[in-house]
Amino acid sequence: MEARRLMDLARAVPETLLLVGTTEKVFASIKAARELLGGHTWSYDDADDPDSPPSGSAGGGGGRGDSGVSPNTAGGGGSLAGLGCNPGPDFWADLLATALAPDGPLPEAYCEITRLVSLHGEAGRVLVLCAARLGIQPGDAHNLGGGEPDGGAARVDLRPDDEAQAPWRRWKDLREAVVRHAHDALLALSSAASAVAAAEDFMRWRYAGSPRRNEWVSAVRELVRDARRSLGEARDSVKLMRDAVVCQYFETWMILNRA
């Protein structure tokens, strides 16, 4: 009875891994943030970005954003929205702030990745503990994150043959890859958020009479470009994370089917 309960619990792990490996929510959040920071809105060249809207598309014609107003609105002498024209700098600062709002795309993406990592880690712990108690885990349980919660020795089946150990070895390598790629994605999101916050500060505290106000505009545009680049890196890391989770899903079934 105990063995059946443990096996049922272990067989729920692949379902959790599949949930983590097929989610689209984090990609939707990253895409929304990248659209807010696109060159079609902030008047910089992102033609080499496959996610950028084509020239002349809705919201992308001639360097105009969804507001229908270009950051290079006439009357500003090359300054962002004219630094006093309508819409003024506060409009663009507010646009940046939407990306950082508690319900904005950047915090949403960060929280979603954190949630997925937590789910993935819990699924791994369940599998290792169940496998150790069932005697289907070769080698030392501690090396795979298992072992008894109270510090006692887990019951493991020490099988030296490579065929038995190979799935577990691959499973462990994939688990480490998931954590590594998730960490890279979170770092990239943090970099993007820092750049967006700095750009917002530039727009909030600009001084229209400053002789260097046009340089501020260039700095804002460069910060926005950097933030969008970091978001692309975060998206790529999440893709790698999901690929590793899907591979781990198949390795998990291979382990359980041999039990």
Image (cartoon, helix red, strand yellow):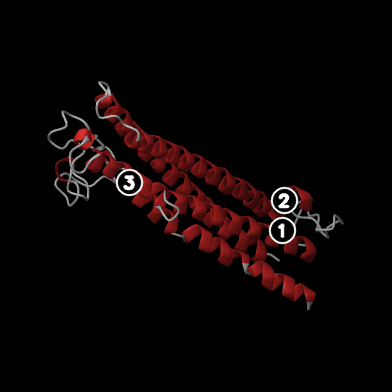
Report the residue marked by disc 1. 128
Residue 242 in the image: state x and y as whole percent.
49, 53
Q: Residues within 10 Å of mark 1 (few under 14, many from 20)?
A: many
Q: Is residue 139 visible?
A: no
| Number of marks drawn | 3
Say which quarter of the image contains residue 201.
top left
Residue 96 in the image: state x and y as whole percent.
34, 44
Q: Secondary structure at mark 1?
A: helix
Pointer 2 or 1: first along the chain: 1
Report the residue marked by disc 2. 144
Seen from the viewer's position, the closer of residues 74 and 123 is 74
Q: Is residue 108 above or below residue 215?
A: below
Tag 2 and tag 1, C-beta contact below 8 Å: yes
User: Residue at coordinates 55% horizontally, 43% vertically from top-left?
Assistant: 183
Mark-to-mark CA distance, 3 and 2? 48 Å
Seen from the viewer's position, the closer of residues 136 and 53 is 53
Task: State which quarter of the image contains the N terminus.
Answer: bottom right
Amino acid type at mark 3 = Asp
Q: Is residue 11 left or right of residue 207?
A: right
Mark-to-mark CA distance, 1 and 3? 48 Å
Mark-to-mark CA distance, 2 and 1? 7 Å
User: Residue at coordinates 41% horizontally, 39% vertically from top-left?
Assistant: 197
Residue 94 is marked as: 3
Residue 45 in the image: state x and y as whole percent.
24, 34
Q: Secondary structure at mark 3?
A: helix
Q: Residue furthest top?
A: 211
Amino acid type at mark 2 = Leu
Pointer 3 or 2: first along the chain: 3
